[in-house]
Every structure is written in structure tokens, then in C-alpha cells.
Image (spheres, helix red, strand yellow):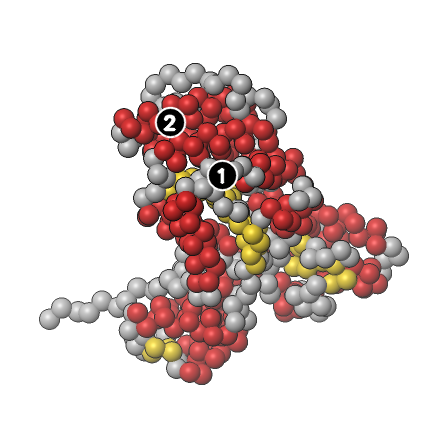
Amino acid sequence: MTESIAPSNPFRPGAGRVPPELAGRDGLLRTVDLSLAQILADSEGDRPIVISGLRGVGKTVLLNEIGRQARESGRWAVIKIEASAGRNLGQAIARELHGALRSTLSMGENARARFGRALRVFKSFQMSVDPGGTYGFGVEIAPEAGYADSGAFERDLEDLLREVGLAFRELDQALLLLVDELQDAPRNDLNALNLALHALGQEPHPVPVMMVGTGLPSLPAVLADATSYAERLYDYRRLDLLDDEQTRIALTRPAERSGVTWVSEALDRAVEAIAGYPYFAQACGKHVWDVRSLADEIGLEDAEAGVLRARDEVDQGLYQSRWDRATPKQRELLQAMAEDGDGPSAIQDLVTRTGKRRTSDLSVSRNELIKNGHVFAPDRGFLAFTVPGMADFIHRTVTT
């Protein structure tokens, strides 16, 4: 008699890992899918999309899923980059676009013929933003004089995207540019990106190039600060915490597909603990699954034990690491913010709580915490945590 094999754990905690159920994200995925479908139908670009939200709500997951679905269509060349303060955005684009172009050229002689000029413009762009880089295509490519070689990033990026977009149009395809952590890109690079996308979008027949960017809730303000009209350039979308029903779906559907059901009290306990935080939902699901006493059912005791294990894992791996990286003065500010829960906190209140005299006394700690991604400014004169649950962690483990 063959022994039955227990179903593997369907839950997948971890940064950027696609969960088994993208609960609460269907509407936004449909919006992006419709835009991409329209671009292919018209062979023209559309308004770029920016998705913002707190850390751990699934922005990177969503970006990866958008890229996966686009690739599966067979008509999108997809490049994905992660912006950072210490890395030139142009170099990142050149590196990833090089890989996409090599893949396209492998489609045959027709593709190579269509991309002749685009490759020369790419060479000009690469030499401008990354002269030390090595980008080969198997044949000698000379730069296209007068295109993407001005040294002005915004103009060179515009030239590059236009020529590559025209080449993809010839193949009845399109280019999808995905940028994660967009708020971390250097300000000058953001300005250049805004200018290039704006110029391409104003053309009578915009080339079939689409950009989707993700970042913290501060991203719309960061983009507008880089270029004033950015507030009208992008289609801004906000990714929020899950509601209770969406959290239930995130927990129950993966379990049901493996033949396991949740007792109602157990589900209620897990939903209450998760408080809508997708990152914690996956951690809870994983640990509850591992400790369940019955093969086909999750009971209240299982949920209680799993929640405790998940809380300990997230405390040590997410919250504690952030706390440990903060300086004593930064921790003082974080503790003051925690009095408002997940916030936001008025700067003036924080001045009073920390015993300071002026708002400028908090400026150094505030700016460092923003730079490190611990907090953000949701509005002028306010601060909030970038990670849901940070205030609760401080209350439980730090505040005496």
C-alpha cells in the first residue's frame, strides 16, 4: 500500500515572492492588463502607471506578476530594474535592455533587420551612460551619430526609447519597462525619466513603450518634486492593506486547494492578528500550516501557535533589524511616533514628546530615517512608518 504524501506548505513568505493567492489585487491587475492590451492593439504607448504603498503590501509581487503575464503573451519585451540612490538609472536600463534586445534578435533575420538602427542608437546611449560597459550582440555595432549621445540623460533616454519602440512596432510587439523602488533613484535621473516619458507621450503616435513604477507612498511627491508636471504625467494607483475578507481569501483558498479547511474561530484569530498586512499573512499562513494537528483542518490552537511563531519571525527579521539599524536619537523619534500607532504623527507633537524646543532639532534624525526607508512624509509636517505594525513592535518590545 502506497503511503499518501502530505501536501506541501502553499504559503510563501519573503520579500517579492509571489503568494499562492493575490487577494485584493485583481482590480489593479486588470487595469494594467487592459492598458497593455490597448497598447498592443493600437501599437501606441499609453500613460505610464505608478503604484505606491507601504513596505510589504505586495508592490514588488505585483510588478513581477505584471511582467510575467506580459512575457507569457509573447508580444512584450520586458525589462525590470530596481532603482537605488547609488546607481545610475541609465546604466541599469542599458544593462537590462541589452538582454532584452539580445533575446529579440535571436528570433531570426527579420528581427535583426528591423532593429539595425535601434541597435546603433542603443550603442550610442550605452557609450553615453556607461562607457566602461561591455554590451555585445555577436556582430560589430557602430554608434548612431547624433542620437542618444548628447550626454543629457533625458534627451538620450528619449532617443533610445523612441528608436527601440519603433523597432518593436515593426515586429508588432512592445517594450515594458518595470522600475521597482523608484523613489530611491537619484533626483536628476527621475527628472530625466519624467522628461523623456512626457516627450514621448506628446507625440502624435507614441511608440509602444510602457512604464510601470512602484515605490513608497512618498513616490508621487518625489516625482513631482523632481518635475512639477509629474503629478499629471502618471496614472497613480495606491496599494493598501487588505480588508478582512481579502485576508480570509488569502488564507483559505491556498489551503482549500490542498484539501485543508480553516475552522471559523481559527480563521478569525489569524485575520485579527494579520490586520491586513500581506507580508504577515504569508508568515502566519506558513506557520499555522506547519503546526496544525490535523492533516485536513486548521483549528483555533493551531492558529494561536502559528500566529506566535509568525510574530516572532517577523519581529526578528523585519522590525528588529530596522530598530537595530537606527541610532539612539533616531530611536527616540521612532518611539515618539509609536504613540500614534501607525500614524501619521505631527512633527510638532514629536517635538513635544522628545523634549525638543524646535522642529529643526529633529531634522537630522527625520531626514536620516527617511533616507533609510524607515519613515516617510505623507504630508507636510507629518511622519509615518513605512512598515505596518512598527508601532506595535515598539510598544511590545521596546517601550517599558
**Which disc is residue 115 wearing?**
2
| Location of residue 287 by image quarter | bottom left
Q: Is residue 99 above or below residue 12?
A: above
Q: Is 287 situated left or right of 7 in this image?
A: right
Q: Residue at x 33, y 24 (%)?
A: 113
Residue 270: x and y, percent?
Answer: 48, 75
Residue 395: x and y, percent?
Answer: 66, 68
| Location of residue 316 by image quarter | bottom right
| Location of residue 34 by image quarter | bottom left
* Residue under label 1: 206
Q: Is residue 285 above or below residue 298?
A: above
Q: Residue at x 37, y 39 (%)?
A: 173
Marks 1 and 2 sit apart, C-alpha to C-alpha, by 18 Å
Q: Residue at x 29, y 28 (%)?
A: 110
Relative depth, front residue between 327 and 89: 89
Question: Is the N terminus in the top left, top right, bottom left or bottom right quadrant?
Answer: bottom left
Residue 74: x and y, percent?
Answer: 32, 44
Q: Is residue 341 visible?
A: yes
Q: Residue at x 61, y 43 (%)?
A: 184
Give the residue type that dot 2 points to: Phe
Give the residue type that dot 1 points to: Pro
